[in-house]
Structures are given as structure tokens and as C-alpha cells.
């Protein structure tokens, strides 16, 4: 069995679904079920004995110790995190509690469990910590992409809290010998993405006839990684990664945000045209940029390809088409996650400049 934390969130749920689609090894899924954790993401696993779900916080040391002793996982994949930059600007304390204090308590519980394992199981055990390219800060337009040895320069409360968690994972390896692996991914997109992030927000707002809010000039550049490619990379790192090492996972898809919005509009014009015959581009509205907005991220994913033989299967064109089609086919899921609190937050965050 493996233990997945944060396994009801966007990336975590996709990982659990993909894992059980390709393996019969059971998953113990722990998630606190905050606003972005959604059990509906896992509806297809209802009644599947390979999936054991527990609602709990990674900061709950007693529950962690009990679950580890009871289920004896051979590996842990840690997705649990507060992960939205804008929310971290408005309320940083939740990010410190989950990403820093929670990671510390998870590491300590895992260290105690791992220390008591028999030698063979202890040698085979792995703790894989999922992080982000945002810990590296921002890049100039012509600067080389982030490699695994790029210095940390976090610029938001979110990225600072993730950087802190990365440093603890590294320290627990070097101090205690805990067999850890760390991955840094670029911007994920795909099914089950909570609609506060750029791509799902644009799709959902476009279909609802609402403005498509674009920060500033929209020329912030990100590397885009289809979530199922990210999941396959994590499986590969867990299988063959060298303990203590970091692996950057990217999609080789650097694009300005405004180009992403234009692509979504074009796909919706094709797949679900507006009744008035206009393009969805007519709904684009530029709003005030967020504080400290990093201008560019870019992942150099050559190490994972060279050492582990992994590279993404999707291009951006194929991945974004699959994503738009998924949202068109899953309107009930979208409606279920758009609570009053979510709508109020979006209204506050994307005020017109």
C-alpha cells in the first residue's frame, strides 16, 4: 500500500485515479477536505476496496501515527498543501500552518514509523514530496529555465511556505537518513482543476457569459504541464528516483497567459459557440495585477528525461483540447464546486482595474 496525502485535490485526485487505473496496489488517501479538496473527484472509486479514504489533517500527529502503524505503507506521496498564490496574499497563515507546520509533523510521524521498520522494508521505503517551480522565483524573458540547482528565491507567501517545506524534507534526509525524493512541477492543468486557477476559471466564466479576468497585460509566462503527464512522472520518480535527489517536471510549453486565454476562446468558439455568434474573446477583461506577480517561470526537465527516461506525452494543443472537452462534459462537477463562498472570493479577487 502507498499513502497519498492531499489525494482529493486536483493533482492528488488525478494521481490516485491514475495509480489505481494502472496498478492493483491499494491507496490510503488522506485529505483534510478544505475548499479545494473534493470527494466528487473520486466518485468513480466508490466501493473499490483498493481505495481507503480518511479525512484528516497532515498536522494531526496522533492520527498520522495511528494510520501509519495500521496500514504499514511502503511509500508516501505528499500532495497536501495550500497552493493558491492569491489566497496566500489575502491569508498567509493557513499556508504556514499547512505547508510548514503540517509538513514538519508529517515528516516527524513518518520518521518515527520508518525508524521502526525491518531493515528490508526500511531500505525500500520512500517519501516523495511534491513541490512547485514557484520556489525558484521569477525569470527574465531571456534567462535559462529553472534547473534543479537554481537558487530558491520565493516571492509570495505561498512559494515561501513551499520553499520552507522543501528545506525541511532535505534536512530530514541529511540529518536522519529519511529516504526522500522531491519534485518541482510547472503549472498543471486538466480534469478536476478547481476553477480559481487560470484555465478552469476562463472556461467556466466563458460558458457562464461572465468576464474573463486577465491580470495586467497578460504577458506573464508559464510552462504548462498536463496533469496526467505530471502523474506519470511522479510514478516514475517513485519507482526509480535516487533518494535525496530533486527532479523538475515540466511540459516544455512556455506560453503567455493571454495566449492561453485566446486558445481557450478559440476552442470554445469551435466546440460550444456563443448564441450571438461572437467570439468568447469579447468577454476578456484586463484587471489590476496581483502584488509581486512573478513574470516568468520555466522548467528545464532534461534531468528527469536523461536519468529516468520520462518526458510528457501531451503537447499543449492536445492537452488543452482534452481539458476544455472535459469541462464541457462535466458541468455537474463544475456546479458542485461553485459554492457561494467561492463566488464571493472570485468577485473580490478579480475586481476590475
Image (cartoon, rainbow, N blue to C red):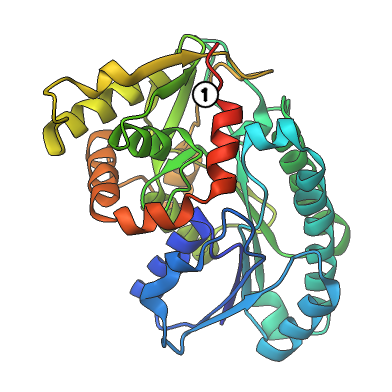
Q: Residue at the location (73% across, 82% down)?
A: 68
Q: Is residue 119 left or right of residue 263?
A: right
Q: Residue at the location (85% across, 78% down)?
A: 62
The location of residue 270, given as percent across then percent down, is 12, 32
Q: Which secondary structure lies at badge 1?
A: loop
Where 353 falls versus 175 (above or below)? above
Quadrant of the image occupied by residue 224: top left
Where 49 falls versus 218 (above or below)? below
Where 168 falls versus 201 (above or below)? below
The location of residue 8, given as percent across then percent down, is 53, 64
> 248 and 100: which one is in front?
100
Q: Residue at the location (72% across, 24% down)?
A: 155
Q: Is residue 248 left or right of residue 256?
A: right
Quadrant of the image occupied by residue 143: top right
Residue lying at the far right in this picture: please name it.
175
Q: Is residue 329 left or right of residue 172?
A: left
Is the C terminus in the top left, top right, bottom left or bottom right quadrant? top right
Where 194 falls versus 17 (above or below)? above
> 308 and 5: which one is in front?
5
| Residue 16 shows up from this direction | yes
Is the N terminus in the top left, top right, bottom left or bottom right quadrant? bottom right
| Residue 251 shows up from this direction | no
Binning the other alpha carbons within 10 Å of mark 1 as few (below 14), some (14 to 19) or many (20 upward) gives: some
> 81 and 353: which one is in front?
353
The location of residue 47, given as percent across then percent down, is 41, 88
The location of residue 10, given as percent across then percent down, is 49, 54
Residue tagged by mark 1? 145
Amino acid at each position: 500500500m502507498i499513502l497519498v496525502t492531499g489525494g482529493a485535490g486536483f493533482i492528488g485526485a488525478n494521481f490516485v485515479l491514475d495509480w489505481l487505473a494502472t496498478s492493483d496496489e491499494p491507496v490510503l488517501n488522506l485529505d483534510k477536505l478544505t475548499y479545494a479538496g473534493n470527494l466528487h473527484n473520486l466518485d468513480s472509486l466508490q466501493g473499490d476496496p483498493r481505495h481507503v479514504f480518511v479525512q484528516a489533517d497532515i498536522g494531526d500527529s496522533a492520527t498520522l501515527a495511528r494510520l501509519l502503524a495500521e496500514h504499514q505503507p511502503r511509500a508516501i506521496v505528499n500532495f497536501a498543501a495550500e497552493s493558491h498564490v492569491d489566497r496566500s496574499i489575502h491569508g498567509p497563515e493557513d499556508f504556514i500552518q499547512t505547508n510548514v507546520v503540517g509538513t514538519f509533523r508529517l515528516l516527524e510521524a513518518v520518521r518515527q514509523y520508518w525508524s521502526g521498520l525491518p531493515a528490508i522494508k526500511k531500505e525500500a521505503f520512500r517519501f516523495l514530496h511534491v513541490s512547485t517551480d514557484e520556489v525558484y522565483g521569477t525569470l527574465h524573458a531571456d534567462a535559462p529555465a529553472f534547473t534543479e540547482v537554481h537558487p530558491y528565491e520565493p516571492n509570495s507567501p505561498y512559494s515561501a511556505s513551499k520553499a520552507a517545506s522543501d528545506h525541511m524534507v532535505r534536512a530530514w534526509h541529511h540529518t536522519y537518513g529519511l529516504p526522500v525524493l522531491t519534485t518541482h512541477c510547472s503549472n498543471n492543468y486538466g480534469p478536476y482543476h478547481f476553477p480559481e486557477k487560470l484555465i478552469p476559471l476562463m472556461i467556466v466564466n466563458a460558458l457562464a457569459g461572465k468576464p474573463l479576468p486577465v491580470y495586467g497585460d497578460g504577458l506573464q509566462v508559464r510552462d504548462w504541464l498536463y496533469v496526467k503527464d505530471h502523474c506519470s512522472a511522479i510514478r516514475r520518480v517513485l519507482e526509480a528516483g535516487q533518494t535525496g535527489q530533486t527532479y523538475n517536471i515540466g511540459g516544455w510549453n512556455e506560453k503567455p497567459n493571454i495566449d492561453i486565454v485566446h486558445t481557450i476562446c478559440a476552442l470554445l468558439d469551435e466546440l460550444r459557440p456563443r448564441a450571438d455568434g461572437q467570439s468568447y474573446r469579447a468577454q476578456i477583461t484586463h484587471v489590476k495585477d496581483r502584488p509581486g506577480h512573478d513574470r516568468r517561470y520555466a522548467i528545464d526537465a532534461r534531468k528527469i528525461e536523461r536519468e529516468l527516461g520520462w518526458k510528457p506525452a501531451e503537447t499543449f494543443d492536445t492537452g488543452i483540447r482534452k481539458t476544455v472537452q472535459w469541462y464541457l462534459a462535466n458541468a455537474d462537477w463544475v456546479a458542485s464546486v461553485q459554492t457561494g463562498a467561492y463566488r464571493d472570493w472570485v468577485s473580490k479577487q478579480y475586481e476590475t482595474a
